[in-house]
Amino acid sequence: MAATLQFISLLGTSSLHQAPSCSSSSNSIEKQRCRSVHMPQQQQRRGRRLRAARAVETDAPSADPEAAVAPVEPPSVDFAFVSPRLLPDGTPDIHYRTACGGQKLRDIMLEGYIDLYGPYDKLLLNCSGGGECGTCIVEVVEGGEMLSPKNEVEKEKLRRKPKSWRLACQATVGKPDSTGQMVIQQLPEWKIHEWEK
């Protein structure tokens, strides 16, 4: 672990005369080295105290248990949204987002600029999250346990679809204090790849 070092003076405060051969470098280590190297030997023999520099680690863990407590990060859910099409090199096009739990999946996707409606976006006016149009379908690849159970609207709209498919406008992601990870397939009816089961 890299430590930030702070240089402190340990011995005395006697005035030392810098030899003219030292450059006026702004580096305090170099100045300290120049002073001790170029000091006339008579001053050293007369018993004058020399300045010494010692490196002290300033970002080391503190012995105080209250100061050692790391800052607590607020709870959040990490998402990997997978596009229905692959990139030109054949790899998945994945967009990572982080959001607080307790929100509808639709809101998280729209706020994160994740494509939710695909080709329906301009042709149809979506239902603004009421579950009427059934166009905000996603496939939950991982983390389905974090979503709220399917309600009657979802059951009706998705009755002939795979069980892993959900309506983003009806699925709530956990609670405000939830943490976890989810993998969401965008527009599963348009994907050109298959997930291993």
Image (spheres, helix red, strand yellow):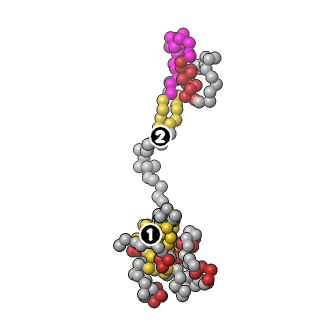
Q: Secondary structure at mark 1?
A: strand
Image height of 73 relative to 150, above or below: above
**Residue found at x 47% / y 77%:** 188
- The single residue placed furthest to the left in the displayed view is 197
| Residue type highlighted by circle 2 | Ala
**Residue found at x 56% / y 12%:** 40
Quadrant of the snapshot with the N terminus:
top left
Query: Which circle's residue, 2 or 1, is located before the other in the chain?
Result: 2
Quadrant of the snapshot with the C terminus:
bottom left
Task: Name the residue nearer the viewer: 47 or 192.
Answer: 192
C-beta proximity under 8 Å, tags 2 and 1: no
Residue range corresponding to the magenta coloring:
38-53
Residue 44 location, x and y as percent?
A: 52, 13
Nearer the observer: mark 2 or 1; the answer is 1
Task: Name the residue nearer the viewer: 1 or 116.
Answer: 116
Task: Name the residue nearer the viewer: 65 or 139.
Answer: 139
**Residue found at x 47% / y 58%:** 72
Q: Residues within 10 Å of mark 2 (few under 14, many from 20)?
A: few
Which label number is shown at residue 3?
2
Q: Where is mark 1, residue-wise?
A: 183
Image height of 45 relative to 60, above or below: above
| Magenta span main SS | loop
| Residue type highlighted by circle 1 | Val
